[in-house]
Amino acid sequence: MILSLAPATTTVGLQEVSPWDIALCVTGTLISCENALVIAVLFYTPTLRAPMFILIGSLAVADLLAGLGLILNFVFTYLIDSSVEFVTLLSVGLLISAFSASVLNILAITVDRYLSLYNALTYHTERTVTFTYVMVVFIWVSCLTLGLLPALGWNCLKDESTCSICWPVTKNNAVALAVTFLLVFALMMQLYLQICKIAFRHAQQIAVQHQFVAISTTKGVSTLSAILCAFGACWLPFAMYSIVADSSYPVIYTYATVLPATCCSVINPIIYAFRNPDIQKSLWMACCGCVPSNLSLRPRTSSDV
């Protein structure tokens, strides 16, 4: 959803490089490196094939493409004649698809956590790898369709008065994407609230380990709150600004909301991948051929936070 922030110019070599664009390019590079590492670990570790890791891998692919999209957007803006319609629509489509897939994969991981708690006794027997792949395919088909919309005519290349804060997406298209994000965020809030309720209910039912469970449950709820707050802090300013603003607003405000949104893809590998004990073990084995003794030997399930 992060695209060109100003209309393209026909003069490539004379453009002054914006510090904001440099920051976005650097962020894209960091995003690409982090998520490439996650994908490599998942690909080369045969034991990481559970449905939970399929969703984490799909999220990493989405964020990797988002990072590459930010780099390409910088290249197209300053090193290639971005007034060429094909170049513009390619950059637009890649960024819309990638960031949309990132958001929807986070929603899918949240749904996975909720279902694994709600149906704790039967969920892992009913769930199959095939079902998870179908869900991932549905996410990507939906997001690729969104990315194709500008190329199919949902753009403001011929009428800049209809542009949103992210050229060349139309104002109506940007509002639709922003409202969809707000609905996704509201659904995530509801799911995390239900997860907290179920976790506290489970804690109350285990009287023997009451003190231990109460402490671990409180820690888990704090972690969930931090995850949700980080996601909201990254994306809500950009979504709200996309609804109220258009191309006539100062571009610095757009940059100020876009940069935090891209940082969500920097945080995602830390939250959903590098905190996972199984992925940590694989990273330690790949880096030094050993696993620290203090690393938990308990496999993490999708219900863990």
Image: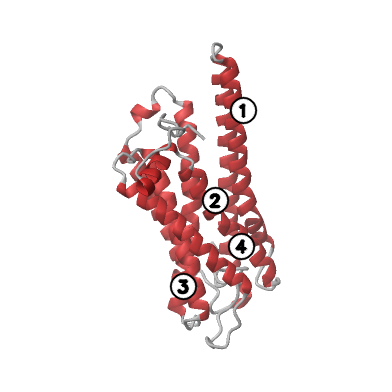
Please state which amino acid type lies under the numbered disc 4.
Val
10 Å crowding of disc 2: few (<14), some (14-19), many (20+)? some
Alpha carbon distance from label 4 to label 3: 19 Å
Q: Are marks 1 and 4 in contact (CB under 8 Å)?
A: no
Percent x, y of residue 92: 49, 68
The residue carrying mark 4 is 258
Which of the two labelled residues, at mark 3 and mark 1, occupies the earlier sequence position? 3
Distance of mark 1 from mark 2, alpha carbons? 22 Å
Provide the residue designation for mark 1.
218
Helix, strand or loop under label 1: helix
Q: Amino acid at mark 2?
A: Ile
| Nearer the camera: disc 2 or disc 3 | 2
x then y, percent, for residue 106: 49, 46
User: What secondary structure is found at the residue carrying circle 2?
Assistant: helix
Where the N terminus falls, by quadrant?
Answer: bottom right
Nearer-N-terminus badge (4/3): 3
Q: Earlier in the sequence, mark 1 or mark 2?
A: 1
Q: Which mark is residue 185?
A: none
User: Image height check: is 72 above or below 230?
Assistant: below
Mark 3 Cα within 10 Å, few/some/many (few <14, many 20+)?
many
Q: Are marks 1 and 2 in contact (CB under 8 Å)?
A: no
Between tags 1 and 4, which lies in front? 1
